[in-house]
Image: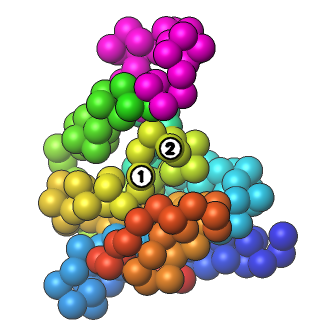
Amino acid sequence: MSNILQDLDRIKGRISDPNFLNNKGLSNEVGIHVFCYDPADEIIVQDYVRRLKAEANTPYHIIECDLYEIFLSLLEDKRVLRAVPGLEEKRGREYLLAQLQKIATPEALLARMDYPNHEKGRDVLFMTGIGKIHPFMRSHKMLDSMQHIFADIPIVMFYPGTFNGQTLSLFNEFLDGNYYRAFNLL
């Protein structure tokens, strides 16, 4: 556990750096960063993000987007959330997954994440809930879709798994897809 605490402590220094906040030094790439952690440390990571967001007088402003919470609100607005258990029982898991993926597209999720006035040099988008939204949404699809919307601010995806600079592996078990434009945060 001490390893995750050491890694989490390094995040604050990284996101305080003016070059990070302004997406400098990335060879004209979009500022998408991945913070990988052992899925067993999920609660520790969630607590750290909550405490980091609550800090005052920082050079950064964290905007957290929990994909799973956004997913649930989307289903609630479409008035299908309560029907999900019955639909799974009646039609099966595969059918339910296909129907929910039609509703929870990257575009639909991004429409709820977008906010019009990104403050370049201060805002940092934290994307959380990656493990909780699986298998309804694949993280590499979200990253592909969000590049143009958040090109002016850094994005940090908190990822319960591994990223080797090319391949995302959710829970160190499922190949989540290839994504070449992201950087490891630490």
| Residue occupying image coordinates x 33% and y 14% | 78
| Residue occupying image coordinates x 29% and y 31% | 102
Classify mark 1: helix, strand or loop.
Answer: loop
Q: Amino acid at mark 2?
A: Pro
What are the residue bounds of the magenta stretch? 71-96
Residue 53 position in % (x across, y down):
53, 52
| Residue occupying image coordinates x 23% and y 74% | 30
Question: How is the rendered protein coloured?
Answer: rainbow
Residue 118 position in % (x across, y down):
22, 54
Q: Rounded to the nearest whole Å, what is the CA distance between mark 2 and mark 1?
A: 7 Å
Q: Nearer the viewer, residue 50 or 93?
A: 93
Residue at the disc numbered 1: 138
Left or right of 122 in this view: 89: right
Query: Relative to 56, is 151 above or below?
Result: below
Question: Residue 41 is drawn in which quadrant?
Answer: bottom right
Residue 32 position in % (x across, y down):
34, 70
> Which residue is farthest right?
1
Q: Residue 167, which numbered label? A: none
Question: Residue 180 is drawn in which quadrant?
Answer: bottom left
Q: Is residue 185 visible?
A: no
Classify mark 2: helix, strand or loop.
Answer: loop
Q: Nearer the viewer, residue 38 or 26?
A: 38
Marks 2 and 1 in Cβ contact (< 8 Å): yes
Residue at the disc numbered 2: 135
Left or right of 104 in this view: 11: right
Query: Relative to 175, is 90 above or below?
Result: above
| Residue occupying image coordinates x 83% and y 75% | 2
Query: Relative to 7, is 94 above or below?
Result: above
Q: Is residue 54 magenta?
A: no
Left or right of 18 in this view: 169: right
Q: Amino acid at mark 1?
A: Arg
